[in-house]
Image (cartoon, grey):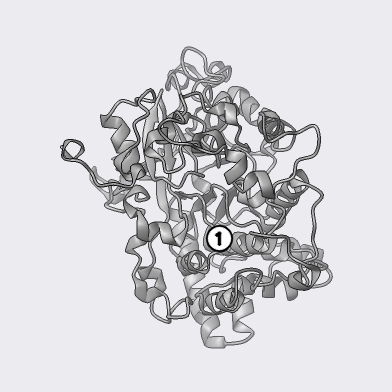
């Protein structure tokens, strides 16, 4: 039986989803109606029942797991048990996606501020294709939900749709109360999990990610990671990653995915405040929910930088940052030279937030970012590289390889402010693609949209076909895989080159090598503004939309 459990399926076999079998038998099922105002729970149930691929399938796999610990309960077997025709279709679909994974390296999609507390956002997540992203990776940049059950449902949903899921917590994820007042025991029903403080909640969130097979530590995503031969149920210990030199000689290359845990602090804001003579602006602790819904143990104080410093230190003690830096300097050629795709929920630079005079709440910059993020990521482009760009290992692999490049490409994804962004500052490219709140896509879609990219794709949830949702907020029976807008893709095929061989003639597709890399810089309203207009924080005259009036003729010009 143990040999059977360890046996790897043949290459033609349908995909085996192992992450489902990792759920402990004594773990209670995630409820699908955990939140909302009156009628919100019933609405979410309708959303998840109607979704083309719901987390219930994953949970069903866990319930069908052999009590003796045999792994390998596939999606196909779960579907076929109830409907043979559905099972046949699922087997065909998975087999096709498996073939695609073997042929093509994984792409990387990014999004932040998913907020699946809102049924509309959960509907959009559920409507994403089960097949189109089966070989790919997705980065979830925090703010999923303050309810652990909603967070688990969301993470498992993305694990069904993407090969790799990466996550770092945001401020909403560490709230230890529901929105509004504390619920009574009767109102909570079976929601009896409590946390002594937000650090305990953070540990619970990170443990939940491990259970769901969601990565929260640095990971080198290689072209072979689009295949399904490996077990992705847990975070991988990067000290034990087996990377060969030949994997960087294929013409495709890999990319480091690097989560950065952080928290905001007021000293991050170093620009002048709006004077009281212009507008009286209350301090963040009086208006922002983080100061009311997060509880920090002494001596941590959200009024200074102590919380931000404590969470930053967890990158070293909990998330293996030191092992990652060691790989950058002393690892294989792939580990030393692969581009960096780091991400955090909070902002690493104040320049990634509009100036105070542009904001309805001008003190927002005091609760959006952390200087510790920038200190952690600003040297990653060159860390461990010698003058030839290859670190100490260059001597071992030869001078030709050692002269590859002087620095790595670096793209950093962030969230929190709900502004679309794509801008390069001091050699690092910064991108934000926020899912945001549903009403924001109706009120100000122009400040959220990112794109189009080189392939003509745009991250624009305002353009989602409304027919994808039924009147009660659920997913309609039409083909939602083509109706739903896709997440933003930042790592994709960027070109093809021919490899000279003695085989097929030049120009043959058999000689083509797919080259993967970061997609070209994209349009976004606020970052485009600052590419063309210098930042002027000394100017404290409120923008016309903040004043509440109309644009003057002079401003219009």
Q: Where is residue 557 in the image (x, y as percent from the top left)?
A: 15, 37
Q: Position of residue 187 (x, y in %)?
A: 74, 71
Residue at the image point whose x is 47% and y is 72% from the top = 93
Q: Where is residue 218 in the image (x, y as percent from the top left)?
A: 61, 38
Hey, which quadrant is residue 345 in on the image?
Answer: top right
Q: Which of 485 and 542 is in front in this view?
A: 542
Q: Which of 501 and 421 is in front in this view?
A: 421
Hey, which quadrant is residue 149 in on the image?
Answer: bottom right
Q: Kindly identify which residue carries mark 1.
A: 158
Hey, which quadrant is residue 304 in on the image?
Answer: top right
Question: Which class describes the residues within 10 Å of circle 1: few (<14), some (14-19), or many (20+)?
Answer: many
Determine whether 540 is above or below 19 in the image.
above
Residue 191: in sight, yes or no? yes
Determine whether 477 is above or below 488 in the image.
below
Give the total of numbered labels. Answer: 1
Q: Position of residue 456 (x, y in %)?
A: 27, 52
Q: What element carries label 1?
A: helix
Residue at the image point whose x is 34% and y is 42% from the top = 547
User: Would residue 548 appear left or right of 318 to someone viewing this image?
Assistant: left
User: Would residue 485 appear left or right of 77 to someone viewing this image?
Assistant: left
Determine whether 184 is above or below 212 in the image.
below
Residue 460: in sight, yes or no? no
The residue at the far top in this view is 387
Figure quadrant of the N terminus? bottom right
């Amino acid at each position: 039986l143990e040999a059977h459990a360890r046996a790897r399926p043949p290459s033609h076999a349908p995909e085996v989803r192992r992450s489902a079998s990792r759920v402990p038998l004594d773990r209670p099922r995630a409820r699908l109606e955990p939140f909302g105002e009156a009628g919100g729970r019933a609405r979410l149930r309708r959303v998840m029942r109607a979704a083309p691929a719901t987390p219930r399938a994953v949970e069903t796999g866990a319930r069908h797991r052999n009590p003796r610990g045999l792994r390998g309960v596939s999606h196909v077997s779960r579907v076929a048990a109830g409907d043979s025709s559905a099972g046949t279709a699922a087997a065909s679909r998975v087999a096709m996606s498996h073939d695609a994974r073997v042929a093509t390296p994984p792409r990387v999609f990014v999004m932040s501020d998913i907020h699946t507390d809102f049924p509309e956002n959960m509907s959009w997540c559920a409507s994403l294709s089960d097949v189109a992203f089966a070989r790919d990776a997705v980065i979830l940049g925090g703010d999923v939900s303050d309810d652990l059950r909603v967070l688990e449902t969301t993470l498992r949903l993305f694990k069904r749709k993407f090969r790799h899921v990466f996550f770092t917590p945001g401020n909403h994820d560490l709230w230890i109360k529901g929105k509004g007042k504390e619920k009574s025991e009767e109102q909570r029903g079976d929601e009896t999990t409590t946390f002594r403080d937000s650090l305990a909640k953070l540990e619970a969130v990170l443990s939940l990610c491990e259970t769901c097979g969601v990565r929260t530590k640095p990971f080198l995503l290689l072209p072979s990671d689009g295949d399904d031969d490996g077990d992705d149920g847990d975070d991988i210990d990067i000290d034990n990653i087996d990377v060969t030199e030949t994997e960087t000689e294929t013409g495709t290359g890999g990319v480091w995915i690097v989560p950065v845990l952080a928290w905001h602090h007021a000293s991050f804001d170093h620009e002048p405040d709006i004077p009281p003579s212009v507008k009286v602006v209350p301090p963040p602790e009086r208006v922002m929910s983080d100061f009311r819904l997060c509880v920090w143990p002494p001596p941590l104080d959200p009024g200074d930088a102590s919380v931000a410093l404590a969470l930053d230190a967890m990158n070293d003690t909990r998330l293996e940052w030191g092992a990652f830096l060691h790989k950058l300097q002393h690892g294989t050629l792939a580990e030393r030279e692969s581009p960096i795709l780091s991400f955090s929920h909070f902002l690493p630079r104040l320049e990634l937030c509009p100036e105070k005079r542009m904001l309805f709440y001008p003190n927002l910059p005091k609760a959006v970012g952390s200087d510790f993020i920038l200190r952690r990521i600003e040297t990653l482009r060159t860390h461990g590289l010698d003058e030839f760009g290859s670190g100490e290992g260059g001597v071992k692999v030869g001078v030709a390889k050692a002269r590859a490049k002087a620095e790595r490409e670096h793209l950093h994804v962030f969230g929190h402010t709900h502004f679309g962004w794509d801008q390069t500052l001091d050699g690092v490219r910064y991108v934000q693609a926020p899912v945001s709140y549903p009403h924001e896509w109706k009120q100000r879609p122009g400040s959220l949209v990112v794109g189009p990219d080189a392939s003509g794709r745009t991250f624009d949830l305002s353009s989602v076909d409304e027919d994808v949702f039924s009147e009660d907020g659920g997913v309609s029976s039409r083909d939602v895989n083509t109706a739903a807008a896709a997440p933003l893709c930042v790592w994709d095929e960027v070109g093809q080159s021919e490899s000279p061989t003695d085989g097929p003639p030049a120009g043959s597709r058999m000689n083509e090598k797919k080259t993967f890399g970061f997609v070209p810089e994209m349009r976004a309203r606020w970052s485009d503004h600052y590419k063309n207009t210098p930042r002027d924080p000394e100017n404290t005259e409120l923008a016309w939309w903040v004043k509440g009036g109309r644009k003057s003729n002079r401003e219009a010009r």
